[in-house]
Image (cartoon, rainbow, N blue to C red):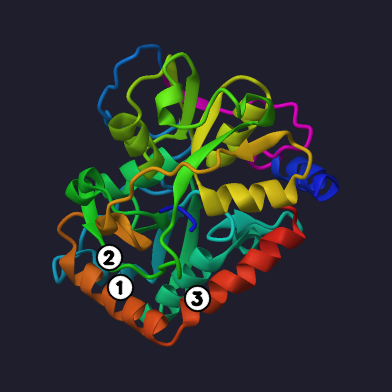
Amino acid sequence: MRKNQMKKLAASVAAALLSTTMLSACSALSQAPTVVSEESSLHHDTDGSSAAVPGSESSEAAHSDSASGGRLADILERGYIEVATEPYFAPNEFIDPSKQGDGKYVGADIELARYIAEKLGVECRIVPLDFESVLSGISDGKYDLAISALAYTPARAEAMELSKGYYFDDEKVQYGLMVRTENLDKIKSAEDLADKTLVVQSGSLQEMFANEQVPAYKELKRVSATTDGFLMVQEGKADAVITAKTTAELYLDANDGCGMTIVPDFSFTVDESTQGTRIGITKGETELLQKVNEIIDEVVKEGTYASWYEEYKEYARSLGL
């Protein structure tokens, strides 16, 4: 559940970010969004295993568990924890281009990562990746935690341990379609996509909606970041993007005049079991999972994460995200 992105600020932010990675916005960008994979068919395929993109490998080989107690013991012994995240999903995780090093990674999820490290008495090392590599990095045991606005899906639960939910919207998160405003009369629901190109973030809950709740489409494009999907629709490279409505609203607020609109009176059906943002941990690492769940209980009970979330919503708006 990815949570849970005006023009002038976005342009300066994008220029700074392009020196480090690829954040797309409705402001003028010369770089096209990265399409992870494409499917030209009226039928849906199933998710394949995701390969890490070049440069997404951990700076060290996958950590071997210490003989005394699995990954948790290994973390405590080496003195740091590696947290994989896709830092393009405000207010959960995003980049402040005015800052340097790990300090440029900010957001409610980043605060949670650093809080977990503090509670364990170790250093927090943020590993920025595309979303598919976040998922595969945890499934393959390359990193310790995935803190990247993860929603529950059955396939994800089979591939990794998922923590307790640490953020729940006051209202149930709704997912819908965002299209160019000129196409509102043509696209009113998922039933209208049979001859349209649809874009989703690869490996996300939104991709699951495309596979399970869209009867047919002309083509499905997968991108590494939701903002890339927004840009593809704006530029006419796709007709619709599946997105959390709150994410789309933030993006539209920050990019007035980009010519896109959330399709009114339509939402995908959300299973209650998918609610709540979670942390991903390598399968079988139950001691680490238990410790993380204890810390989650604390930040939820005291309202700490909810406060971070509201704080970073304003922070992201100040950057035009």
Query: Going by the image, does 29 lie left or right of 185?
Result: right
User: Disc 3 marks which amino acid?
Assistant: Ala
Which of the two discs, 2 and 1, sits closer to the camera? Answer: 2
Spot occupied by residue 287 in the image (x, y as percentages of width and height): 18, 71
**What amino acid type is highlighted by mark number 2?**
Ser
In reply to whether residue 189 is colored magenta, the answer given is no
Calculate the distance from the C-alpha at mark 3 to the C-alpha at mark 2: 17 Å
Q: In front: 46, or 82?
A: 46
For marks 3 and 2, the one nearer the N-term is 2
259 versus 165 height, above or below: above
The image quadrant that residue 214 belongs to is top left
Residue that numbered label 2 is attached to: 163
Question: Where residue 2 sits: x, y (%)?
Answer: 45, 52
The residue singled out by tag 3 in the image is: 306
Where is 89 relative to 258, above or below?
below
Single out the residue that lies furthest toward the right: 8
Q: Is residue 37 magenta?
A: yes
> Cβ–Cβ below 8 Å for labels 1 and 3?
no
Label 2 element class: loop
Q: Residue at x 55, y 58 (%)?
A: 93
Circles 3 and 2, Cβ within 8 Å, touching? The answer is: no
Q: What residue sits 49% from the left and 18% below the top? A: 196
Q: Is residue 168 above or below residue 119?
A: above
**Most foreground residue, 35 or 173:** 173
Tell me which amino acid carries mark 1. Answer: Val
Q: Which residues are magenta?
A: 19-38
Q: Is residue 247 visible?
A: yes
Q: Residue at x 59, y 60 (%)?
A: 102
Q: Secondary structure at mark 1?
A: helix
Q: For mark 1, what is the residue? A: 292
